[in-house]
Amino acid sequence: MKKCSNPEHPHCTFWVLPGETVCAGNHPQATTAPSSYDLLTALRSARSEPSATAVSHAPAHDAVFQAVSGPVPVSAVPPTFTPAPVAASAVPPAYQPVQAHLHISGFDPRAAGGRQTLKMELRGMSAACAPQLTMRLRSDLIPRGQVQHDFVRTTRGDWRPVFVEFSSRNKEHGQYQIEVEVHSHVDGAAAQKWVCTFVILVPRRDATLTEIHQIFLSTHKNVRVMADDASIARVTGGDGCNLDVTARNAGIAHVDLSAPQGKIDMGFTTIAWDEELIEVDLPAISHCHPHTSQAACLVNAAPEAGEQRQIRLFALEECMLGRFELVDPEADVLLSHFSPDGQDNNGLTRRLSGRHAIIRRGQQGFEIEDVSRYGMLLDGVWPGKHKPVALRLGMRIELSASIKGIVVLSVTALLAHGVILHRIDHGARAECFYLLLPDTQPSPASHLATPQASCLPLLFHRNGGFWHLDTASGKETALAPATALDKLSGFGRHNRFASEPYPECWIIRTEGATLCDSAMQTA
């Protein structure tokens, strides 16, 4: 429905139903050109009508024009003896490029310091693409720095919307970029790729509602009117416009949004906008990982003698070791005390700091640094706080220095692209850890490993995901939940890939941009 649009009665407030030529006040309405939807509907109805001869339905474009524009004069009707081949040779429709874009809504900058939810709708995507698209987002606002979602095509032909959650708690006010990549995969390889970047404003906590909306409209307006040097700017009509009207130097700005006479209630528009998706070229052979992640786990459902139930995988420049927490853990590698009766997340586990030690790549190779409150022993000696020490093969790492036996780790492998740690306490059968550098190729010739780690598979991180390398054949296999691990070297039976480092627990991270955030305070 729309209001009366008769120019001679600008103050008429009667509504006009679709298809009506007059309003309730008998004011004639201006005819509008047929929309693309009307043309397509008329074309389909013309094609679906049964015809006895080929001549009657051959001029399809004439039928469309007649169905939309009304009856055609007799003189304009083509003769019945027109051959069908001549009428069928119609001019093909002009090619219209697909303008794929993301419609983003649901953002409320007034919720400074709280949880936010963005609704993203994929529109204008070509029907020739895959029925499922992968969207990857990177931003300092998103937990762990990135998140991945899937767009799925519905039976109606449109795309199911995706909701992305983040929190602006403990974030400095200002603008934050969110980088978006949309991939179309065919047979596990990326066939098409679209990118876009938009900006999210995190306002001050004391910002007023008017200030927030003014800042938003200044960056997302689609109509801007300027009046300079005694000129006059005039705007009429326009539903759904975000206006920015400026008048300076004795200028006059007049805005009339077809409102009735009397008091006008001005309101702010909904915070929603469109971001155009730009398709980029891909190389002929794409090695994009089908399941990107920075942390994962290899789960062994039936471990044999000497095997661990979980092999935790981490691909970070700096990996933080700390106390196990179910809600908002501060570390990447979450450690718990294991007693003869099993895992105990309370008790002695509470004597570990939330951020206990950091393992990173230094000038002398991989090193460890104590950042805890309770201390750390390296081969029985406390190295001192904030003093990096190079890791050695077989080094014994004991957390903490005040109480022995809480968590004891051993360096079982020093790789060119990472470190492997095994527990040598009561949790030896429960877990071990791969701490890998992201996007780093392995060099098997330079590996140093103990017999305990030499039987493990050779893994590395590249293109955003984890890979398996067969040292005998040199074959590289991407690790994903659907990968059959029993067919790869180094894996036994009953192994599966999990996309979370702790799939047996429900870890809740409500804040923190990445798995490792060195700016936070030491617990």
Image (cartoon, rainbow, N blue to C red):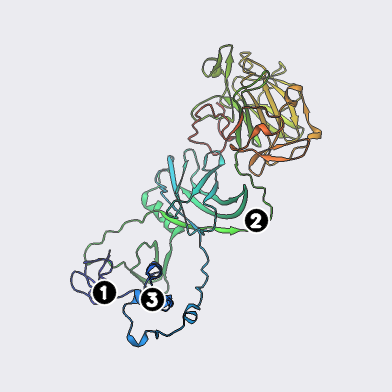
For residue 347, above or below residue 144:
above
Q: Amino acid at mark 1?
A: Gln
Q: Which residue is mark 2?
A: 282
Q: Disc 3 residue type?
A: Ala
Pick whichever of labels 1 and 2 is earlier in the sequence.
1
Dot 2 lies on which element? Answer: loop
Q: Secondary structure at mark 1?
A: loop
Residue 33 lies in quadrant: bottom left
In the image, 111 versus 418, the foreground residue is 418
Mark nearer the viewer, 1 or 3: 3
User: For the residue labelled by badge 3, is the local secondary structure a helix, a strand or a loop?
Assistant: helix
Lower sequence index among marks 2 and 3? 3
Q: CA distance from mark 2 to mark 3?
A: 43 Å
Badge 2 density bin: few <14, some 14–19, many ≥20, Cα 10 Å: few
Does residue 248 appear left or right of residue 280 in this picture?
A: left
Which residue carries the number 1 mark?
29
Residue furthest out toward the top: 340
Residue 174 horizontal side relative to residue 468, left or right = left
Quarter that holds the C terminus: top right
For image coordinates 27% across by 72% down, the residue present is 5
Nearer mark to the viewer, of 2 and 3 = 3
Residue closest to the eye, 204 or 262: 262
Using a 10 Å C-alpha cutoff, classify the residue at mark 3 as few (fewer than 14 neighbours), some (14 to 19) or many (20 or more): some
Sequence order check, earlier mark of 1 and 3: 1
Spatial separation of the CA atoms under disc 1 and disc 2? 51 Å
